[in-house]
Amino acid sequence: MNKEFIKRIFSSIILAPIALYFIIKGSFLFNFFLLICFIITICEWHMMSKKKFYYIFGFIFLIFSFYTVYYLRNYEGNDYTFFLLVIITCVAADIGGYIFGKIFKGPRLTKISPNKTYAGMFGSFLLPIIFTNLFLNNRDFLGLGNNIEMQLNLFIIVLLTSFISQIGDLIISIFKRRSKIKNTGKMIPGHGGLLDRIDGMIFAFPFVYILTKIL
């Protein structure tokens, strides 16, 4: 294992419980955590895209994106299963893409992000299905209520959310290439900036928000 991968693991071990704590606690604690994340993300976007023609559009999108996160956690009742489902899908898509890409390698998916491979894309669909299914089948153990079987509608939502998350990753990669930078920041060892870590989520949450409004 290289040093960057080790840093990535340790960062995740530290940050995941912190984020989960605020998500579970909800109320003003979650709102405070979300506000901090929003400020950091906005700052990273500003540093990355200042003087670019799409600068203001990025600001508008990030405001809408973080609003959807706020809404889905605070106004969809006390059962935040669906909220966690989005988080798990995005994280699993990222892990699946990274692990499958490193192990199986193979042809590159796109020139936009040279590290993306077809094997990684497969992993980005497979792991979210496995992780979300495990989560739904162990809701009682986690104290979130009765277990839920993975139905076709949830299966499709997970696949679509994973797809949107991967697209979001590629879109941020395009902006990074335009700015001639590798990462949006240096805040998280092994990951880069916060925007590097949540690039898929900032697209997945608006998608799920719109989906809930339509359905």
Image (cartoon, rainbow, N blue to C red):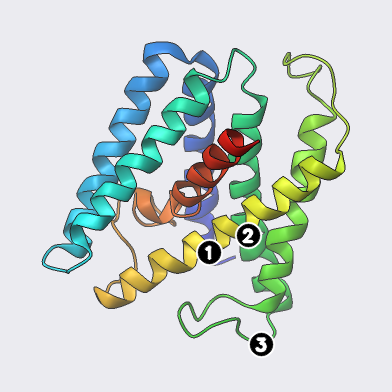
Q: Is residue 153 left or right of residue 98?
A: right
The residue where tag 2 is placed is 163
Q: What element does badge 2 sit on?
A: helix
Screen quadrant of the C terminus: top right
Q: Which tag, 3 or 1, sits closer to the chain's start?
A: 3
Q: Residues within 10 Å of mark 2 (few under 14, many from 20)?
A: many
Residue in the foreground of this view, choosing between 126 and 69: 69
Q: Are marks 2 and 3 in contact (CB under 8 Å)?
A: no
Q: What element does badge 1 sit on?
A: helix
Q: Are marks 2 and 1 in contact (CB under 8 Å)?
A: yes
The residue where tag 1 is placed is 167
Q: What element does badge 3 sit on?
A: loop
Residue in the foreground of this view, choosing between 190 and 2: 190
Screen quadrant of the N terminus: bottom right
Q: Position of residue 154 (x, y in %)?
A: 77, 41
**Closer to us: mark 2 or mark 3?**
2
**Closer to us: mark 3 or mark 1?**
1
In the image, what residue occupies the spot 48% across and 62% down?
169
In the image, what residue occupies the spot 47% across and 54% down?
7
For the residues labelled 2 and 3, the Cα–Cα distance comes to 19 Å
Residue type, numbered disc 2: Phe
In this rendering, does residue 4 appear at all?
Answer: no
In the image, what residue occupies the spot 86% across and 44% down?
152
Which circle marks residue 107 in the picture?
Answer: 3
Residue type, numbered disc 1: Ile
Q: Is residue 156 left or right of residue 40?
A: right
